[in-house]
Image (cartoon, rainbow, N blue to C red):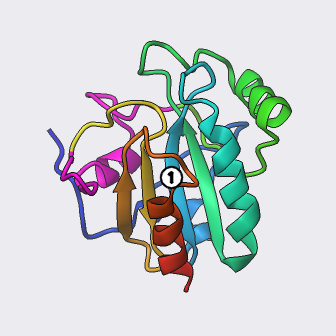
Amino acid sequence: MTTTDHNGSPLDIEIGALQGGPANLPQFSGKAVLIVNVASKCGLTPQYSGLEKLQERYAEQGFTVLGVPCNQFLGQEPGSAEEIAEFCSATYGVSFPLTEKVEVNGEGRHPLYERLVGFADAEGHTGDIRWNFEKFLIGRDGRVAARFSPQTEPESAEVVAAIEGQLG
């Protein structure tokens, strides 16, 4: 079993982009990044709309959303890379970057999530990702600044305050 490395930035991890090639996370160094495991067929999928609004509102201030498709929760992200990209673009006008589809829990957990899951949310939850749309805010310093439950809306007061705290 691997241990969670709190010393390195999640942005140092290599992960592929949704439509091939590297996602190049180091390009986001010095920015605030909201990493979200996403799915196209979930009851929480409408959160894509709020995530895109955050992207539009804060991108010019050094912020980005990073969507990480995952099919581990009741198979709610079954599509190919092309299908996911088309759904996100056509349905929600998503302009933020998306990574390759990965596992966020279990033996096949992607190293990006190995680096994230040791951090607690406001209720003290650490460990496994509970559902689609769990959110991690990475600060400009490259460290995890906040974790939010899947049910926390992207445009909620606590998420907005955390983002603005990293941008201010």
| 46 to the left or right of 38 | right
- The answer to whether 161 appears left or right of 125 in the picture is right
Question: Quadrant of residue 41 in the image?
Answer: top right
Residue 78 versus residue 105 in the image, above or below: above
Q: Secondary structure at mark 1?
A: strand
- Magenta segment boundaries in residue numbering: 102-126
In percent of the image, x 55 and y 22: which residue is there?
Answer: 42
Can you tell which quarter of the image residue 72 is in?
top left
Count of picture labels = 1
Quadrant that contains the N terminus: top left
Please say whether residue 153 is one of the residues in the magenta stretch: no
Magenta region, main secondary structure: loop
In this rendering, the answer to whether 111 lies above or below 56 is above
In the rendered image of this protein, does residue 44 appear above or below residue 74?
below
| Residue 100 percent across, percent down from the top left | 59, 36
In this orientation, which residue lies closer to the viewer: 72 or 154?
154
Q: Position of residue 114 (x, y in %)?
A: 30, 47
Question: Which residue reaches farthest bottom?
Answer: 168
Q: Is residue 66 visible?
A: yes
User: Is 110 one of the magenta-colored residues?
Assistant: yes
The percent position of residue 144, horizontal first and vertical second, equals 36, 65
User: Closer to the camera, 67 or 27?
Assistant: 67
Query: Which residue is rendered at x = 63% and y = 69% of the image?
Result: 63
In this rendering, would 89 be left or right of 146?
Answer: right
Residue named by callout 1: 35
Quick one: which residue is furthest to the right in this view? 90
The quadrant of the rendering that contains the C terminus is bottom right
Image x and y of residue 161, in percent? 49, 70
Residue type, numbered disc 1: Ile
Badge 1 crowding class, 10 Å Cα cut-off, few under 14, some 14 to 19, many 20 or more, is many
Q: Is residue 12 visible?
A: no
